[in-house]
Image (spheres, helix red, strand yellow):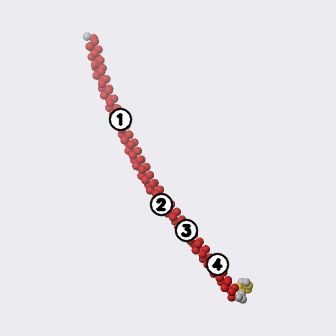
Amino acid sequence: MQTVNGKLITKQQGQIDAIQQQTEGIIKRYQNLESQFTAINQQKDAKYLQEVNAVKVYLQKLDKRLNLLEQNVSSQAKNFLYFKIGVAIGLVGLWFWFGMNNQPAHHETKPKKYTESIQLHHHSN
């Protein structure tokens, strides 16, 4: 094919028809490739959105578990505090109880001395 100043020059109509058919074929292939590319991108976008949604659901589940864990830790901390307070009260109670039990023992020693003195007095007769 001949060109003059970048323009195609032909003497036969058949050559022009062949060029038009080639151009139309190239345009159809381009459109076909473009539609395939768009379909692939849409599939990738859909897959990406699915993955993002799956991550969101997983994060929501983790957030729920974290909240439950925080509640459990808070509950256990309260229970431990109550236990410590109970133990402290119990220890103070035991300290008082043992302190009260030791006091009557001091009172019992005096009558024993009195009975001993009576026994000694009784032997002298």
Specify the label residue 94 is tagged with: 1
Q: Nearer the viewer, residue 56 or 39?
A: 39
**Please, what is the three-letter code of the amino acid marked with disc 3?**
Gln
**Please, what is the three-letter code of the amino acid marked with disc 2?**
Val
Q: Position of residue 124 (x, y in %)?
A: 27, 11
Q: Nearer the viewer, residue 35 or 15?
A: 15
Residue pointed to by mark 4: 26
Which image quadrant: the C terminus? top left
Secondary structure under the numbered disc 1 in the rendered image: helix
**Residue 43, placed above or below residue 109:** below
> Can you tell which of label 2 and label 4 is closer to the viewer?
4
What is the quadrant of residue 39 in the picture?
bottom right
Q: Residue furthest front?
A: 14
Q: Position of residue 52 (x, y in %)?
A: 51, 63
Residue pointed to by mark 2: 57
Secondary structure under the numbered disc 3 in the rendered image: helix
Upstream in sequence: badge 4 or badge 1: 4
Upstream in sequence: badge 3 or badge 4: 4
- Classify 10 Å Cα crowding around label 3: few (below 14), some (14-19), many (20 and above): few
Q: Position of residue 123 (x, y in %)?
A: 28, 12
